[in-house]
Image (cartoon, helix red, strand yellow):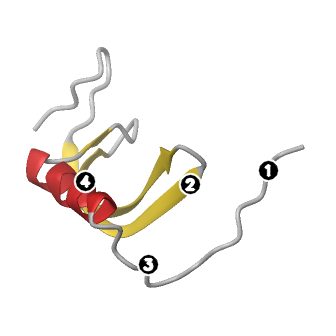
Amino acid sequence: MNCTIQGCPGSYEDRVIVHTVKQKSRVLVFEDVPAQVCDICSDTLLAPSTIRHLEQMIKLKSEPKKHAPVYAYA
């Protein structure tokens, strides 16, 4: 599929990404998320089913597999 960003000649390819969500004061990081990523501009598309799955994980407050420090740029 061709990239949807105006003027970008790229096309989307299947990849797995790291996706971050900020929810109130929490930062949630999801690894190995399937996505379509433009090979030129890196525009990223998530399938509706992927988004629903991420939302379900957040709603159920699944226990994270890892913990990481978060630094504030100051």
- Residue 71 screen position, x and y as percent: 77, 58
Of discs 1 and 3, which sits in the foreground?
3
Contact, CB < 8 Å: mark 2 with mark 1? no
- Element under disc 1: loop
Q: What is the number of the mark on residue 64?
A: 3
Picture residue at 54% right of the left edge, 43% below the top: 24
The amino acid marked with disc number 2 is: Arg
- Residue 10 screen position, x and y as percent: 27, 35
Neighbour class for label 1 at 10 Å: few (<14), some, many (≥20)? few
Of all residues shown, which one is farthest toward the right? 74
- Pointer 2 or 3: first along the chain: 2
What residue did someone put label 2 on?
A: 26
The amino acid marked with disc number 3 is: Pro
Label 2 – label 1 distance at C-alpha: 13 Å
Neighbour class for label 2 at 10 Å: few (<14), some, many (≥20)? few
Q: What is the number of the mark on residue 55?
A: 4
What residue did someone put label 1 on?
A: 72
Quarter of the image for residue 19 reads bottom left
- Residue 13 screen position, x and y as percent: 20, 52
